[in-house]
Amino acid sequence: MNKLKRLWSNLRTSFWFVPSLIVVGSILLAVALIEVDSCGSEHWLARWPRMFGPGAEGARGMLSTIAGSMMTVVGVTFSMTLVTLALASSQYTSRILRNFMGDRVMQVVLGVFTGIFTYCLIVLRTIRSGDDGGFVPSLSVSFAVVLGIGGIVALIFFIHHIANSIQASSIIASVAAETMVAVDRLFPDDLGKAPEDDAEDQPPLTLSVGNWQAVPVKGNGYIQSVDNATLLRLAREHKTIVRMERGIGEFVVQGSPLASLALDGPPKEEVIADLQAAYSIDRHRTVEQDCAFGIRQLVDMALRALSPGINDTTTAVMCVDYLTAILARLASRDIPSSHRYEEGKLRVITIGPTFAGLVAESFDQIRASACGNIGIMLRMLGALQTIASLTASPSRRQALGDQAKWIAELAERTIESPHDRARFDIRLGSRRWEDGAIPPAANRVGDGVH
């Protein structure tokens, strides 16, 4: 199952799969219309002679013109696509290239142009002059004109789409939307009910279950996904406990421990093979089971925007806004405990995300790059306040309060303007956080340079 999911993910984010399907469809369409022409072309010609009455030479010239034009457009389209990818990679981060490659509009438009070219070739091959028996598929030739006009429309739409897709707001919103889909899939909505406990933040249990037998990693790469059902089945069938040694999104090295089994002796080869097959490992991370990777992409864009060479605070603020939306979606949802039970028995010990960990992933590096930037500090503080208003969990509110405390410490060290400090302290004091989360010095208003 993991192999099929990985195959589908790779196909979905490739520039050849959808265009290939469209090319195959255009071949089938051409063959079907040629068959229709062979059965009733005289009827079409007699009824609409001006529309369906080109001779063999005229039909060849028309199809050759359309086919040649489409190949020229294909070259221009691929050039525009590559320029867009290079621009997005240098301006934002190379980790968003996979999002562009998975853009369905780009894939379909490329497929339309190559499909029209292929259609014209198939129809052109069937045209014969009078000396060769005489056959001009009038309906197929006329439909090629319709496809050519459709190709022009597709080109205009593609240019508009490219211009829109390279805007910072579109890229950031696209990454955030994909991440929120992953959040909804991994942590289903509990109708707004807050977690009854904070099991996600509890330390791992100390178990006395015999010897842990490590299963090695089969190859180098990032863990993209894990088949939890397979881990549970292996633990149940062998009456043991499976403990993950590496979590989704982590880089693993061949031969290092991937997971461990609570057994008295080494596991059988088939057990090792089944457990290794439950992990999908590849050269890059994906968002499907790794919502932290979506957060990582937004953080990378914010860091690039805050770098001295770019100094684009507005883009960084937008990244913080969408990080807020992602964490707000998580604030009231239950993140499962790392200990998975079946019929009262511990079966699997996982390594998964925690709310505090995702908050740290979102804000730690941005905060470190925001020295003296009052705009980004105020936005981060507002983000923490928004997220805190959506959860009643003490540990989650404490994690958010800690972030506010660290932002306050950064402001005290790096903001020299008394006016800016006053603005920050007023915003900081407008929200009541957990006791002890913010030091008293951070609550002073307008007291000058510290």
Image (cartoon, rainbow, N blue to C red):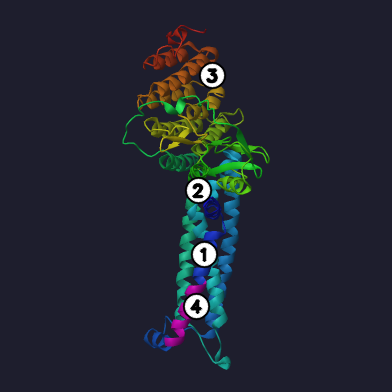
Mark 2 is surrounded, within 10 Å at the Cα level, by few (under 14), some (14 to 19) or many (20 or more) other residues, namely few
**What residue would you read off at disc 2?**
163
Residue type at mark 4 is: Val
Mark 3 is surrounded, within 10 Å at the Cα level, by few (under 14), some (14 to 19) or many (20 or more) other residues, namely some
Q: Which mark is residue 31?
A: 4
Mark 1 is surrounded, within 10 Å at the Cα level, by few (under 14), some (14 to 19) or many (20 or more) other residues, namely some
Residue 216 position, x and y percent, is: 65, 40
Earlier-in-chain disc, 4 versus 2: 4
Residue at 42% in and 10% down: 443
Between disc 3 and disc 4, the foreground one is 4
Mark 4 is surrounded, within 10 Å at the Cα level, by few (under 14), some (14 to 19) or many (20 or more) other residues, namely some
Is residue 29 magenta-colored?
yes
* Measured Cα–Cα span from mark 4 to mark 2: 37 Å
Earlier-in-chain disc, 3 versus 4: 4
Residue 434 placement: quadrant: top left
- Mark 1–mark 3 contact, CB under 8 Å? no
Q: Which mark is residue 137?
A: none
Q: Which residues are magenta?
A: 27-39
In this view, 91 is above or below 20: above
Q: Nearer the viewer, residue 153 or 397?
A: 397
**What residue would you read off at disc 3?**
372
Earlier-in-chain disc, 1 versus 4: 1
Residue type at mark 2 is: Ala
Q: Secondary structure at mark 4?
A: helix
* Measured Cα–Cα span from mark 3 to mark 4: 67 Å
- Asked whether residue 285 appears in the rendered view, the answer is no
**What residue would you read off at disc 1?**
21
Earlier-in-chain disc, 1 versus 2: 1
In this view, 436 is above or below 54: above
Earlier-in-chain disc, 2 versus 3: 2
Between disc 1 and disc 2, the foreground one is 1
